[in-house]
Amino acid sequence: MNLENRYYQLSARQKTSFKLKLIFCCLAILILIVVISIYFSSYILSVFVLWILLSVLAPFFDVPSMIKTGKLKYESLFLISEKEKNNQITIHGGTLFDYYFTLNKNSSAKERKNLILSEYLKGLLHILDSHKDNLSLEIIGSTYILNQRTAEKMGFDVRKTNMVQLIILILNYPNLICTKSFASKKLSFPNLKEIRTYKANIQSLNNSAATIRKIQNALERNLSYQNS
């Protein structure tokens, strides 16, 4: 499958046009909700909708901006890494922005899930290749897509998600709903209890590199079969 993030193929004018349309749509929704709130003298709904809109909008502005400034980097289509700090790299799964501009609208839910996981592993292998000489470098990330058993096979240790991470996840929950629903092609609610934080150094991941490649290759073969 030859996929790419279509946003980065747009001209500067097309990017601006898309963002303006997105802002206009969100403002229209918000204004309607505010009018309804004023009519019923209750503003809780307005605050709730504002929270949802800001959460959903954020990656469409934050990700391209931070990629441009170098604060974030694509390791693959759906794996993003932060700039190395204190001998540690924090990784993130693809956002709603990445899903919207990359996934084929005609692909099935199974194809999407396999592709996303495949790109996670491809990105992880890219990190291993890029930092193979720094064996003590730590990789850390939180996700609900990768299950604990598979993560441990790849050399990760499971860590308890700390309170700060949990608060961030809660604040971004509307975005997580949209992201999971987009991948599943149906309304889906992520279970925060299923989100795990995984941590490993380059050495332990290198020791499991063959396993990671085996899983990634199996996913790619599955995708090729599904699209044949």
Image: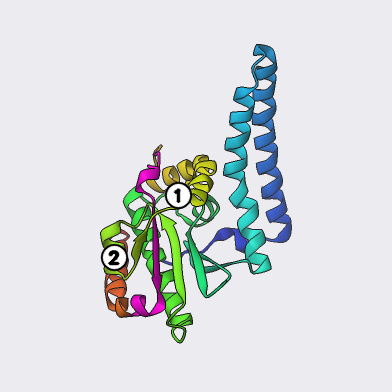
Tell me the kind of residue under disc 2: Glu
The residue at the point 60 percent across, 31 percent down is: 49
Residue toward you, 194 or 180 = 194
Q: Is residue 193 left or right of residue 53?
A: left
Q: Is residue 20 above or below residue 38?
A: below
The residue at the point 51 percent across, 53 percent down is: 95
The residue at the point 51 percent across, 71 percent down is: 88
Tell me the kind of residue under disc 1: Lys
Q: Is residue 115 left or right of residue 55?
A: left
Q: Which residue is mark 2?
A: 152
Q: Magenta residues?
A: 188-206
Question: How was this image coloured?
Answer: rainbow
Q: At which x and y percent is residue 147?
A: 30, 56
Any magenta on residue 4?
no
How many numbered marks are there? Answer: 2
Q: Mark 2 or mark 1, which is nearer the start of the sequence?
A: 1
Residue toward you, 198 or 95 = 198
Q: Residue furthest top?
A: 40
Residue 218 visible from this viewpoint: no
Q: Which residue is mark 1?
A: 105
- Mark 2, secondary structure of its residue: helix
